[in-house]
Structures are given as structure tokens and as C-alpha cells.
Amino acid sequence: MFLKEADLLSFSFKQFVYKLKAHSNLLYGLMLIQIIALFFSIGGVSHMSSSNGELSVSVNTYSASLVIGFSFIWIFFIGILLTTKQYKKIELPLVTSSLSGNLSDIGFLMIASIFGSITSTLVGVLQRIILYISFDQTQIIFDKFLISFYDLVLGIVIGTLYMILISALGYLIGSITKLSMAFVLIIPAIIFGFLRVYTDFFQKVLLVYTKEAALPLFALKVLITVIILFGVSSLLSPNKEVSQ
Amino acid sequence: MNSLLLLILLFLIGIVIISLFQSLRSKITRLLSWRLSAIIAGLYLGFLAMLVPILYLLPANDFIKTVENKEQAISNSQILMNDLYNQKFPSEEDLAKLEGVYKNSSHTFKVDSNKLSINLRTKTGSYHVLIQEKDVDDNEINVSAYVTAQYMGEVNFTKQLAPPAISLKNGILFLTTPNYQTLEFKQFNSDFTVDQFKHQNSNNGLSTNFGEQIIYIHVPKNLEINRDGLEDRIQLIGARQKLIQRAQ
């Protein structure tokens, strides 16, 4: 018996709530990785100095970009992790189909992306306060020390979109490797092969997103890509009967 | 290439951390219920959110502000230096009014000899000494030190420069540069996610503009000036300059 379409959303939602509870411990990894990234960022992300023989002037630059970058890595692995047998076993006690399982996974990844983006952006605020306490104010350049509320919200929205995109990529890779363990070797081989033959291929693909300066267009690109990635992942998932 | 290596390194560090966490996770999971996880995640989020109003409430009086007109200040300084090289010397009043030029010290000495020599103890050639004769013989030597605009990126550090040590002994005016000075600044950049849409980090390659020092000396009328060997760095201006030009 397959799930009826009308029931799909309610089943998916129940699974999503269930998975939210079951996978809640994954957030510890995010918190840990953000704290480690913050620790790495305390020394500054770049340094520049000049001297004229009598005077040396140096500027240390700080940002939360490293924290955001680490959070991206985390969500990528969570995307892969959710497709593994160990995590799919969680669905067994529930009434489930592969589609509802995928939808609930996507729901979890979205919540994790929102949480990851909010916290990684706010760690930038923590970083500023730590540096405010640690250094003399006369050393701190006021410009960009205060983040405007608009920039905070913008950072959270963009971070969320990136994290959803990266989680979808991780989920697709996980779904492919689930078909056969051979893909664990084949995928990196294809990636490295592509990098050697078409050196700027991945760079061009990345630029499609990273060079987009219009937010609505960026959101549209991410949305289309995410639909494709999750769609392909769902198609690759083996159809299964409802288990109870 | 370096950025690619950095990216790979970050990726590897991330993998190691996540792998370590994954290996410990099964043990931790047994100890922690989802309720506890939700509470901890909520506290973490709440703590970070609470920091936002705190950040806005922090007193920011002593921060370095970058609202000055940098281009104008640098341009004025460059014009001033060109004028000095072309023997066009400004009056001290004009110099003091010039935007971007900062007076960092002034001294008054009683004349202790009928002759004045200058001992310039500087490590660089960025010191220019201008000597102007007063209309009166008031027995006083007035020395002022000025510094032209000094920037790194958008940071104006002109006012943070230590002035030269100036003293008068037995008819010799000693001008000594301060000890090697180190200035350190902390700058925040927008996160790359925001920068993609706002392009705020345009000053990634910070350019440095080191300025010059101008020592303006007013001497009493008829005080003999000895500038042997330092004619290119010590300029006599006003009536005294005209006398020298006539003699030449």
C-alpha cells in the first residue's frame, strides 16, 4: 500500500517532528565547530603592516567568515549523514515512504540551516564583544564594528540560502553513494578529474552563486538548484512500501 | 592558489572535528535527551541573540572613526610637499589651517647664544625644517612640529604619532625623532555573505600613506643661523631667504 497524496504532507510533518527530536543532538556538532572557528578567528583573518623606518603600522582584520565557512562544512556533512543507513533506521518505527522520508529530511536540513545561519552570523557579534573587552578601544576602528540590524538579517538570509544549497548537495552525494559504495570512490575521482581537465569549471559554477549581487536573483538560483538537487536525490532513493 | 589551499585546509579541519564529534556522539547521545539538546540549543541561540543589544550599548567614544575627508587631506599634504621641494614655503598660519596637517608639539626656548645650529637626529629624510626670522628681537626661539596626513586604508593615524624631542643647549637646537613607534589597529570586515551583496570590504588591499614632518622655527631678528651640511633640509624663509638669494 502506498501513501495517499493527501496523507503525504501530514506523514512527512510527523516524521519531520520526530526527526527533529531524534537528530537534535547533531546541533552539538554545530555549536562545537562554531566555537572552534571563533577561537581560530580571534587572532584575525588577515594582517597587513607597513613601516617607514621610524614607524610601523599594522591592521588586523576580523570577521565571522571562518565561523560561517565551518558551519557550511557542518551542514554538508549533515546532508550526507541523513542518507546513511544508521540515520535512515530512525524512520523504521514510523509509517513511511521514501518520499515522506526525503521530505522530512529536507525539513530537518532547512531547520538546521536556519539555526546554523542565525548562530554563525551572531557569533560575529560575540567576536566583536570579545575583542572590545580584549583590546584598547583606541585600537579598534569603528567602521563595521557595529553591525546594522539590516546587515544581520541579510547575513542570516544569505547564510540560510547557502546552507540549504550546500545541504542539498551533501544530500545528493549521500543519496548517490547509497546506490553503491563504489560511488564513494567514483565521486571524488570525477571531481578531481574534472578539476584537472577543466581547471576553472568548478570556479565558474561557484561564480554563478558567489558573484550574484542581486538578492532576488540569487535566491531564485538557489531555489532552482535546491529543487533539482533534492528532486534528483528523491528519485535516486529506492521506492519502498510503507512500513509500520 | 593560496586561497584554494586555505579552503582545502579548512575543509580538512572541519572533517577532523566532525569525525571526532561523530565518534563521541553515540556515547554523548545516550547521556543527552532531545529535551536537553533543545534547551542547550535554545540557550546558545538566546545567549548569542542577547549579545546584539549589548553590542549596540557598548560605549564607543574612543573608537577610531573614519569619517574624515581622506582624499582632501592627502591631496593637501602632497601639494604642500611639492611646494616645499619647489622652494615655495607657506607661512605658519597657513600651515596650521591646512586640512590634514596636524601640529603635534610646540616649544619656546630662551636664546642662550648669538648663533643657532641645528642638530637633526632623524632616521629618515621625512623631516623638513623651516626657519623664519621674526620682526623683533624678543630673545625667544619658537619651535612647532607639524605632521602631514598619514593613513593606512581609511585609518588616519596622524594624531597618534609621537612628536620629535626638541631641546636647546649652548646654541644648538636638537631635533630628535622619537623611538621606533608601533601602531596596531583592529578592523572588522563584513562577513563574505553580506559582502557579496553590499561590497563593503573594498579596502582589502590597504594602502599606506606615510606623511612628512615639518619643523617650523621662528628665531629672533639678527640671530645667526648655522646650517652647515644641512642646506637641503633646513630652509630659511622670509627676509633671511632673500638675503641669501642676493648674496648668491
Image (cartoon, helix red, strand yellow):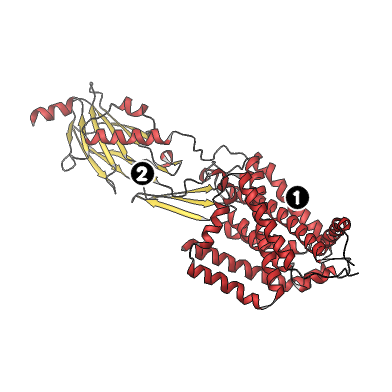
Residue closer to the observer: B25 or A173 = A173
Where is residue A29? Give x, y as percent: 71, 64
Extreme residue toward the top, this view: B135
Q: Using the image, determine if residue A158 lies above or below residue B156.
A: below
**Which quarter of the picture shows residue B103?**
top left
Amino acid type at mark 2 = Phe
Left of A231 or right of it: where is A211? left
The Cα–Cα distance between marks 1 and 2, rounded to whole angstroms, is 46 Å
Q: Does any portion of residue A146 appear in the rendered image?
A: yes
Q: Which residue is mark 1?
A: B46
Q: At label 1, which amino acid type do we have?
A: Gly
> How many circles with numbers are drawn on the protein?
2
Q: Relative to the observer, which residue lies in front, A82 or A48? A: A82
Label 2 crowd bin: few (<14), some (14–19), many (20+), radius 10 Å: many
Q: Chain of mark 1?
A: B
- Chain of the residue under label 2: B
Question: Please, which residue is most extreme toward the left here?
Answer: B248
Quadrant where the image shows the N terminus of chain A: bottom right
Is disc 1 surrounded by few (<14), some (14 to 19) or many (20+) residues within 10 Å?
few
Q: Nearer the viewer, residue B134 or B17?
A: B17
Q: What residue is shown with label 2?
A: B210
In the image, is residue B6 above or below residue A57? below
Image position, residue B59 (x, y; %):
61, 39
